[in-house]
Image (tube, rainbow, N blue to C red):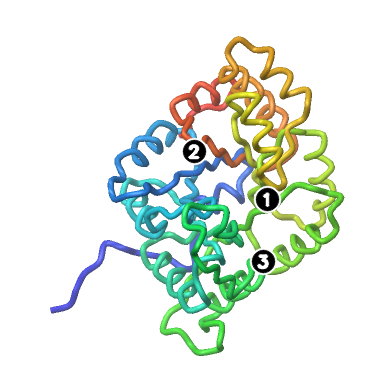
Amino acid sequence: MSLKTNVTYYPAMPSAFKEKLLSDDFVITSEISPPKGVDVSSAFEEAGLIKDYVDAFNVTDNQRAVMRMSPLAMGHLLKEQGLDVIMQFTCRDRNRLALQSDLLGAYAMGMENVCIMSGDYPTKGDNPGAKPVYDLDSVQLLGAMNRLEEGYDIAGNPLESSPSFTKGAVCNTEPDQPLQLMKLEKKAHMGIDFFQTQAVYDIGHFETFMDSISHMDVPVLAGLIPLKSAHMARFMNEKIPGIRVGDELIARMESSTDPAEEGLLICAEQIRELRKVCRGIHLMPIGHYSHITALFEMAGLHEKN
């Protein structure tokens, strides 16, 4: 007796998320982190709070090198809830065999949207003794995905059937970093469908970055992390490469009687400005999901459909 599956994929058809990228709509994505355990109820609850405003959810892959449930499992469970997902794949934890294997598995389960990144070094996470892999870098992995779409693995062996991904990558927003821009150009040449950036706090600086990559013609979703305190802003300045919170914003946070509310107001102001500059935003709430609906309303964003 043959087995039946509920999974159907149409390699020639774009995903709902890709259709959004190709439309004139302002695209909104947000992160969901798998649990550090087996109970996914908190992740479901967080996604449920904002799902009506978001086009797709990035499922993080051992974010900041902290061990969590497999993003493949979490993504599949969210997909079963009717949500569009973007699978994050880091080059840190898998060799080329595992990366290609998981990419095929994700596609077979209906998850064609993928965002590639190198991944933080293990010493930054909660298992500092873990050995990093980095068998492929992010550009090489995008090349491997192209080969899978052509019907071959990275070694040139033919596949029995091939996927069709919506491919994304992450980037910092430093227009004065020539090596960074060279790497972005390499990613763009790999036929990438979108970029998601590190958190943006200086819109003028971001506009300069957008001008510097305008020739690449790739949709850009600007990263946003709502500030909760001046301490958080200083911490990110010190610890997270590519993030720079200006003194003016830190002063606003320090002088506010409600720093969390002030952080949402700042973020809403940024969203209104970013709507004039790029194709969308990528929100990283960091446990702040219950306030995000209010943020969207402050920014003049409305429920989808």
Q: Earlier in the sequence, mark 2 or mark 1?
A: 2
**How many circles with numbers are drawn on the protein?**
3
Nearer to us in this view, 135 or 266: 135
Mark 1: few/some/many CA within 10 Å (<14, 14-19, 20+): some
Q: Residue 76: where, in percent of width, then height?
A: 35, 56
The quarter of the picture where the N terminus appears is: bottom left
Mark number displayed over residue 54 = 2
Q: Earlier in the sequence, mark 3 or mark 2?
A: 2
Nearer to us in this view, 305 or 130: 130
Quarter of the view holding residue 198: top right
Q: Amino acid at mark 3?
A: Gly
Q: Residue 97: where, in percent of width, then height?
A: 48, 79
Q: Residues at badges 1 and 3 in contact (C-beta under 8 Å)?
A: no
Residue pushed farthest top? 257
- Residue hosting label 3: 191
Residue at (49%, 88%) from the top-left corner?
158
Q: Earlier in the sequence, mark 1 or mark 3?
A: 3
Residue at (49%, 38%) from the top-left corner?
54
Q: Is residue 191 above or below residue 57?
A: below
Q: Amino acid at mark 2?
A: Val
Instruction: Describe the element under mark 2 as helix, strand or loop.
Output: loop
Q: Residue 287: where, in percent of width, then height?
A: 46, 34
- Residue hosting label 1: 219
Mark 2: few/some/many CA within 10 Å (<14, 14-19, 20+): many
Position of 211 compared to 38: left or right?
Answer: right
Mark 3: few/some/many CA within 10 Å (<14, 14-19, 20+): some
Instruction: Describe the element under mark 1 as helix, strand or loop.
Output: loop
Q: CA distance from mark 3 to mark 2?
A: 25 Å
Position of 186 compared to 230: left or right?
Answer: right
